[in-house]
Amino acid sequence: MPPRRRSTSGYRGVCQRPNGGFYAEIRSGDLRLSLGTYDTAHEAARAFDAAAWRLGRPRLQMNFPDVRTLQQALDLAPPPRLNSAQDRAEHTALQRRLLVAQEDERVMAEWRRRHPEDVAYEQEYWERRREEDTRRRREERLDRRRRKALACAQADLVNAGGRSFFTEEDERWFDIWLSTSDDTNDDDAGADDWSD
């Protein structure tokens, strides 16, 4: 049988979980031997190699062929993970939160089915809010352009030898550096005026 290709983790027998952990297992025909979940892909690969040594696999099927004995593989493998009472309590709390979230989704779906007029009102409300936010952002952008143009005109006047009606400590001089970019997304929520 041809050798299996390596997984996306870069190690044989190691898969990345959606939660960011790494799961190690050994497959042989119909047999799947779970080796557990680890914090890093490297730890999971070391656990895989220790189990492969115990099962008598050839060194070519291991992740670290430089390990020459079973004892070396066991020394390099991470210690087995122990599930403490705190781990079980965290798992129970997460399961409870998941059940609450699922019940919330079920109740909201039922509410939407029973009260379509409220759903329509809510959608209209959020559409109005988006339109008002877009209008407000456009007005603010227009005001920044006007302030920047005034500050630039005063700077040009001073550079040409004229006299500005801004005083030296006038904060309106800082308006020269205002962003007036049109590349801002109308859907961005409160983007910083100084980020360009």
Image (spheres, rainbow, N blue to C red):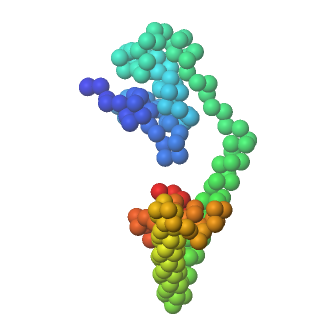
41 versus 194 height, above or below: above
Identify the residue at image location x=58%, y=76%.
Answer: 107
Instruction: Tell me where residue 10 appears, x and y as whole percent.
Output: 40, 30
Residue 85 location, quadrant: top right
In this rendering, does residue 120 appear at all? yes
Report the side of 10 relative to 97 (left or right): left
Instruction: Tell me where residue 30 appears, x and y as whole percent.
Output: 37, 34
Residue 118 location, quadrant: bottom right
Q: Which residue lies furthest to the right in this view?
A: 85
Identify the residue at image location x=64%, y=54%.
Answer: 94
Instruction: Tell me where residue 175 appears, x and y as whole percent.
Output: 55, 65
Residue 185 location, quadrant: bottom left
Instruction: Tell me where residue 34 appears, x and y as whole percent.
Output: 49, 34
Residue nearer the viewer, 131 or 68: 131
25 versus 163 height, above or below: above
Residue nearer the viewer, 52 or 66: 66
In this rendering, does residue 152 appear at all? no
Report the side of 96 relative to 7 (left or right): right
Report the side of 105 relative to 187 (left or right): right
The quarter in which the N terminus is drawn is top left
Report the side of 84 relative to 40 (left or right): right
Q: Residue furthest left?
A: 2
Identify the residue at image location x=63%, y=31%.
Answer: 81
